[in-house]
């Protein structure tokens, strides 16, 4: 989707629908704004249900302060205006109160963005603004002063978060990623002390090679490939709605009958992917005009080594990733479904996906369909699209169950005899 072709009011509706729908704000809480080329601020209204907004509800505030629309602008408009005045490079602002970020705001801490590889780059440095009365000029000055230092993600003491960006999608992306970091850190601390990536590990990421691929123009798209592209987009959007993917992170691929495969593009919004956005890979070449996921080489090598695998997912679901950033293993011996689908779930070292593609790809035998990469991702394989997606869901739900069980008592795992019965009954 090309957001620049949407009217500011429609952009705000689109993003508020996501924020409210994913439980990241309440009916009365949060506000979004866009600064247009005429220096007009389009902003959510005061006192209108965030779950039932229409484009006619969005308020336009002119440079002279007059408003256009049937409602008053959000009571937080003053800090939006002050941020835009302090930061001419910002054209959109997201403010909301997701529970995980509120948790950090009420203990006056900031989520750590050094748990996984890309989050620090997406969010940038995080600031903290001093508490002041909501809607007051003092609150606006407190927030704007932090933004003036060059920071674009600001936690508010006992309040929530404000994120700015050059457009509304980029502001939302940073906001969503910061919320993900908060949820991940909370989950990880239920297990123990999370490990942070070192500067050396960040250098490993920055020095990792971009996949060098040639390009080709497909002669045609057969019915089987079109069906796979359609079904992939359906499951990618479901993965996003279930928060197994974020807007720009999460990779899905599927092998085609001729040995080529289709994979998600790099950086595109997972919420609105369409079949034509996916990238076909043939040998060392990618479909012309498209940029595939940076993990394309690993997907390709998994398919080359393992004829039993036809689908691969790389994801960062927050409950599974709590195990990736702590020393705890994710044990599948919880309920029969978990063991049947997950089997062995080894942990691989952080740089396994950068420096040892061959060894990493080799790990996915029939007994090891899923692996966790420390401080990085979970890699899931399957016999088909639905099998791989089901396995990802089961892994995330199993991890969530284990995290929740911690406050109830000691976990009793399925015993060796019961495991043998499962292996015999389901021909594992």
Image (tube, grey):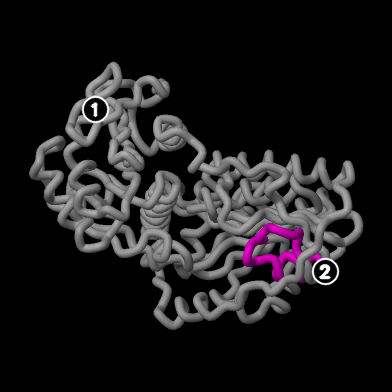
In whole angstroms, how far apart are the C-alphas of marks 2 and 1?
Answer: 54 Å
Few, some or many C-alpha atoms within 10 Å of disc 1 (few <14, some 14-19, many ≥20)?
A: many
- Under tag 2, what secondary structure? loop
Residue 266 screen position, x and y as percent: 60, 59
Is any part of residue 97 visible from this angle?
no
- Image marks 2 and 1: residues in contact by CB distance under 8 Å: no
Return the residue at label 1.
73
Quarter residue 95 falls in: top left
Please tell me which residue is depicted at 68% across the width and 58% down the height of the picture: 290
**Segment colored magenta:** 286-304
Is any part of residue 45 visible from this angle?
yes
Quadrant in which the C terminus is drawn: bottom right
- Choose between 294 and 416: the one closer to the eye: 294
Return the residue at label 2.
283
User: Where 193 falls versus 107 (above or below)?
Assistant: below
Please tell me which residue is depicted at 86% across the width and 47% down the height of the picture: 221
In the figure, is residue 428 to the left or right of 325? right
Q: Is residue 370 magenta?
A: no
């Amino acid at each position: 989707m090309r957001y620049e072709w949407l009217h500011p009011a429609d952009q705000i509706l689109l993003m508020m629908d996501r924020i409210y729908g994913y439980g990241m704000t309440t009916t009365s809480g949060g506000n979004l704004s866009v600064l247009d080329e005429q220096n007009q601020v389009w902003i959510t209204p005061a006192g209108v249900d965030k779950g039932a907004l229409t484009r006619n509800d969005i308020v336009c505030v002119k440079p002279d302060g007059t408003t256009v629309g049937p409602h008053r602008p959000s009571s937080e408009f003053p800090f939006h205006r002050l941020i835009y005045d302090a930061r001419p490079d910002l054209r959109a602002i997201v403010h909301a109160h997701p529970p995980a970020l509120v948790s950090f705001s009420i203990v006056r801490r900031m989520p750590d963005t050094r748990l996984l590889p890309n989050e620090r780059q997406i969010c940038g440095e995080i600031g903290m603004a001093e508490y002041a009365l909501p809607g007051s000029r003092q609150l606006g000055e407190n927030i704007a002063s932090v933004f003036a230092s060059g920071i674009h993600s600001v936690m508010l003491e006992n309040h929530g978060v404000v994120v700015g960006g050059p457009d509304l999608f980029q502001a939302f992306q940073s906001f969503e990623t910061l919320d993900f970091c908060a949820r991940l850190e909370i989950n990880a601390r239920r297990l123990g002390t999370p490990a942070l990536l070192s500067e050396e590990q960040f250098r490993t990421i920055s020095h990792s090679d971009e996949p060098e691929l040639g390009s080709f123009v497909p002669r045609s798209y057969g019915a089987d490939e079109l069906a796979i592209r359609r079904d992939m987009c359906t499951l990618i959007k479901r993965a996003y709605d279930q928060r197994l993917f974020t807007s720009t992170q999460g990779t899905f691929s599927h092998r085609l009958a001729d040995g080529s495969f289709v994979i998600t593009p790099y950086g595109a919004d997972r919420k609105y992917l369409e079949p034509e956005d996916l990238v076909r890979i043939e040998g060392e070449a990618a479909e012309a005009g498209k940029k595939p996921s940076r993990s394309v080489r690993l997907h390709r090598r998994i398919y080359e080594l393992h004829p039993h695998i036809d689908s691969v997912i790389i994801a960062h679901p927050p409950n599974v990733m709590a195990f990736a950033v702590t020393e705890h293993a994710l044990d599948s011996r919880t309920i029969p479904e978990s063991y049947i689908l997950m089997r062995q779930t080894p942990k691989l070292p952080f740089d396994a996906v950068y420096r040892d593609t061959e060894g990493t790809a080799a790990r996915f035998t029939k007994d090891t369909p899923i692996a966790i990469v420390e401080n990085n991702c979970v890699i899931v394989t399957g016999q088909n699209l639905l099998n791989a997606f089901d396995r990802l869901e089961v892994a995330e739900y199993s991890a969530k169950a284990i995290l929740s069980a911690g406050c109830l008592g000691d976990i009793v795992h399925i015993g060796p005899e019961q495991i043998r019965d499962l292996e015999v009954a389901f021909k594992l």
